[in-house]
Structure formats: C-alpha cells, structure tokens
Image: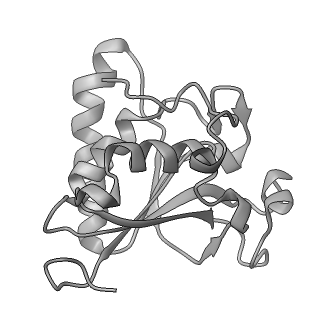
Amino acid sequence: MSSAAGTTPEIATFAAGCFWGVEHIFLKHYPPSENKGILKTAVGYTGGKASAANPGYRDVCSGETDHAEALRIEFDSSIVSYAELVEFFYRTHDPTTLDRQGNDRGTQYRSAIFTHSPEQLEVAKKATSEVQDKHFTPRGEKIVTQIVEAGPWYDAEQYHQLYLFKNPNGYQCATHRLHW
C-alpha cells in the first residue's frame, strides 16, 4: 500500500493501556477518511517473551507473556510527522503510572513506545523529554513510558479491531482522553 505521496507508509507502535481506547482516540482525531496522515491501524500484542509467540487475548491478560496491548499505525509522514504522533500519544493517556491506566493493571497495560528505526528512537526520546519538561515536571510527576525497539507484532483477534467503533457503549478507560 502506498501513501498519497507515493512513499512507503511508516509504522508507529504505541502501548497506552487498553488498546480499544488507544485506537479509538487516534482514529477519532486522525480519521483516514480525512487524509490527516493515519492510513490504517491494527490492535495487537508486542513486547513480550520470545517464547510466547502468537499470543491470544487470554494469554496476554494472564500477564505471563509480558506482551503489551498496543496499537500499530501505518502513517504517511508527508502529512503527519512521527513527532506529532508521539506527542499525541502522550496527550491521550497517563504516562506516569507504571503498568497501569485507570483501573486496568498489569504489564499488558504499560505505557510504551516501540520504535522501528534509529530515527524514531531519537524522535521518541526528544519528544518524551519535551513533554516531561512542559507537562509533568511542573506537576512533580515523572514519565515512566518505556522506549524500546519494536519486536514481533501479533494482530489481536478480529473482534478487538475497531472495537469501540463497532461497540460505542463498550468499556473505555477514563484516561483515554485529551489531557492538554
């Protein structure tokens, strides 16, 4: 799939608690139909033990696989920058809680940025520092988001994809909102 500019789409992968809410808020603000840069999303699992390949939802929820519920975004960097997506990621959850978002607790709900290149790593570190200084240091809080190299990705089961669009009254973590 090529983006409008004829370039290969880039990939961004974020974990910020329950993947339903993460996908929902990104697509609400960057709907593919409005050409705001996000081309396609998928929810799934990443960042787990190598011995736990191709996990399912129950496996991940057990906490035994160390996978995070995450969102994989294909985006057109000529329309939206990776830096903008990283900042938006921070705006939409509480990156100061370790292995938790709201009532959702466990390593599968951790805050993490899974980078796909050395350039993404540098951008993620810089954006994290800027967000920390501007939004969290003044409140005496510290970002605990992991920034790690992306590893294997496993799509979640089909019923999880676009879940809150298909089930508007479905569970939504209260932290998935714009914080600034």
- From the top left corner, tell me how far across and down residue 80 is, in percent: 19, 58
Image point 30% across, 74% down: which residue?
10
Q: Is residue 154 visible?
A: yes
Query: Residue at horizontal 13%, vertical 79%?
Result: 5
149 and 12: which is toward the camera: 12
Q: Is residue 19 visible?
A: no
On the picture, is 6 further left or further right than 116?
Answer: left
Is 178 on the left-hand or right-hand side of 35? Answer: right
Q: Quadrant of the rendered structure where residue 178 is? A: top left
Residue toward you, 169 or 135: 169
On screen, 119 above or below 147? below
With 162 as the anchor, is 50 left or right in this view?
right
Residue 131, x across and y down, in percent: 27, 34
Front-lying residue, 178 or 15: 178
Q: In which quadrant of the rendered view does residue 147 lie?
A: bottom left
Residue 43 coordinates in the image, percent (x, y): 58, 61
Nearer the observer, 170 or 120: 170
The residue sitting at 86% across, 53% down in the picture is 62
Please state, as top left, top right, bottom left or bottom right, where the C terminus lies in the image: top left
Task: Give the residue displayed 16% in from the left and 85% down from the top.
Answer: 6
Which residue, as the protein is rendered here, is positioned at the far top?
139
